[in-house]
Amino acid sequence: MGGLMTDGCRPCVVVWAVFLLSSVMGYRPVIVVHGILDGPRQFDILAKFINQSHPGTKVTTLALYDYISSMKPLWQQVDGFREAVRPIMESADDGVHLICFSQGGLICRGLLATLPTHNVHSLILLSSPLAGQYGDSSYLKYFFPKFIKSRLYNFCYTTYGQRISICNYWNDPHQRERYLKSSIYLAPLNGEIEHANSTAWRDSFLRIQKLVLIGGQDDGVITPWESSIFGFYDSNETVVEMEKQDWYLRDAFGLKTLNSEGAVVKCVVPGVHHTSWHSNLTVYKNCIDKWLT
């Protein structure tokens, strides 16, 4: 009878199997960067999803520049987040995964650009305004109640305006010249203007193994929603897809190279509102889970 397992022992064996599997697999640590007016507690459900499917994974949601502090200029935030992620990366021999939500996606882009020795394996961008934002939203009305989108450039494209995070990625398709002249964050990051760090930033971006772009048409905040997959408006407010954008065709920051290598994944999910991306189980299972090994 010694070779038979009683029903009472089966749960014990399952627990040990899971423990041993997680030890053998050695899942890479996951770093989460929150969005605007967010903080760590908004990502408790995501952390739970990760630990259910990848037991033992160390998940760190950075408690930095959260809530109202998330309005500070993005380069300032990048400086702070860079110091926070550095020790996590240095202690992870096999690299880390980076999950970045909304505005956090742009912060992560800045992190990678300025961390030439980073070891990010999968960069997962959850509904981020990667090509910019041009649209009314509850966030915009909250902070700029007197402005409408067609006039916001009058504020955003000033030295003072660029001290506010939203203005760092405000991309008015009708004010292209002013945007290129005034944008101190998004335009240089996407290689829309030439600068001394272009090559170094591109090389650093190309260190990632997988780029996962997640978004959907019912987001309700990111405008156009295709900005989350690197699409954006032309001067007629017609959306131009990623592959036809000028900076993509020039491979200004390495996106075309990554895509040609099969390293870029687009995951478009309908029916998800902006604030629900990180707590939606379908999004997790279909767009995130497989890239966290």
Image (cartoon, rainbow, N blue to C red):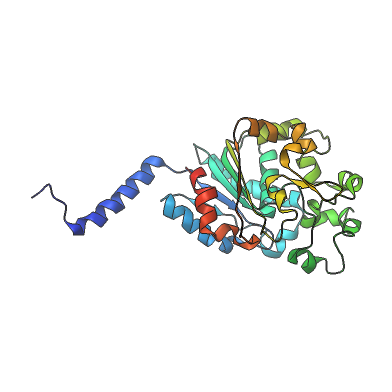
Taking the spot 78% from the left edge, 57% from the top edge, the residue there is: 166
Q: Position of residue 131 (x, y in %)?
A: 75, 46
Q: Nearer the viewer, residue 97 or 127?
A: 127
Taking the spot 74% from the left edge, 35% from the top edge, the residue there is: 248
Instruction: Name the quadrant containing residue 206.
Output: top right
Q: Nearer the viewer, residue 65 or 198?
A: 198
Q: Position of residue 98 (x, y in %)?
A: 58, 46
Q: Is residue 265 above or below residue 135?
A: above
Instruction: Name the quadrant containing residue 72.
Output: bottom right
Q: Position of residue 42 (x, y in %)?
A: 58, 63
**Horizontal placement of 183 versus 74: left or right?**
right
Taking the spot 54% from the left edge, 59% from the top edge, the residue there is: 280
Specify whether residue 116 is in view. no
Tally of numbered discs:
0
Q: Is residue 259 above or below residue 143?
A: above
Taking the spot 76% from the left edge, 37% from the top edge, the residue there is: 244
Specify whether residue 253 is in view. yes
Which residue ends up furthest to the left in the rendered image? Answer: 1
